[in-house]
Amino acid sequence: MINKNTLIAVYESVLITLLNERKSALHFYINQNAFSHMSLSVEFWHYDINWQIHSHPETHFSPHHHFLAAPFITLSDFEEDHSHVYELRDIMESWEKLEQDGDGTLEDMLCLLSHEALAEALNKNTVKSLLLTLFSENPALQTKSLHELVIVKDPDGRFDKNFMNVAA
């Protein structure tokens, strides 16, 4: 089983990479009036992070010429060039063996651990600074807190909460 602090460190490295690699596309979406928030969830059964950018209800983004808003990032796109992305996918893949031996309790624990660690990594100084710099470019977002603009949620609904509220 993986140590939570190790998982946070791996997520932090991956998030920094993803933010730097998609900075211009993030800037493109965040600076549109339609931007509402972004959501991240861990889909470890697919060895992936689901990262989406959401618009306000009844508004639509002008489309980016290369990147969709949903899904915005697919982790596997970065696996080849970034060893820490591969490391994260290996961690997630190792959980599959653990899940097969359990009754669902372990899967719930892994889901909780993975989302808590992701939220804590998003709140680490470097990642948080990158996000806040991007958000500060849109005057409409300057009064919103990070946990309003970035939502970490369990896609299966096991845990009905924004993990960013817990990690903040």
Image: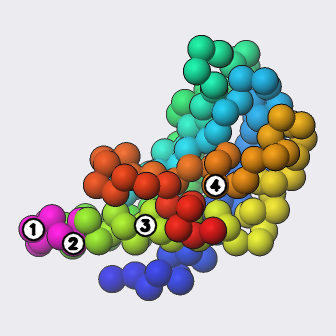
Kind of residue at badge 1: Asp
Question: Label for residue 147?
Answer: 4
Scheme by which the image is coloured: rainbow
User: Upstream in the sequence, badge 4 or badge 3?
Assistant: 3
Q: Is residue 55 visible?
A: yes
Mark 2: amino acid: Leu
Vertical comparison of 149 with 9: above or below: above
- For marks 4 and 1, give the CA distance: 33 Å
Asked if the residues shown at circle 4 and circle 3 are in contact, with their CB atoms under 8 angstroms apart, the answer is no
Question: The magenta stretch spans which residues?
Answer: 100-107
For the residue marked with disc 3, what is the amino acid?
Ser
Of callouts 4 and 1, which one flags the residue occurring earlier in the amino acid sequence?
1
Q: Quadrant of residue 95?
A: bottom left
The residue at 81%/54% (across/down) is: 132
> Residue tagged by mark 3?
114
- Point out the frontmost of discs 4 and 2: 4
The local secondary structure at tag 4 comes to helix
Note whether 21 is above or below 163 in the view shown.
Answer: above
Q: Please name the residue that numbered disc 2 is placed on.
A: 106
Instruction: Tell me the CA gap for discs 4 and 3.
Output: 17 Å
Q: Amino acid at mark 4?
A: His
Q: Going 73% across and 16% down the picture, which residue do you hit?
A: 62
Q: Quadrant of the C terminus?
A: bottom right
Q: Check whether the beta carbons of the residues at disc 1 and disc 2 lie within 8 A of each other.
A: yes
Q: Is residue 129 left or right of residue 66?
A: right
Q: Earlier in the sequence, mark 4 or mark 2?
A: 2
Q: What is the C-alpha distance between the residues marked 1 and 3?
A: 18 Å
The residue that appears at 43% across and 66% down in the rendered structure is 114
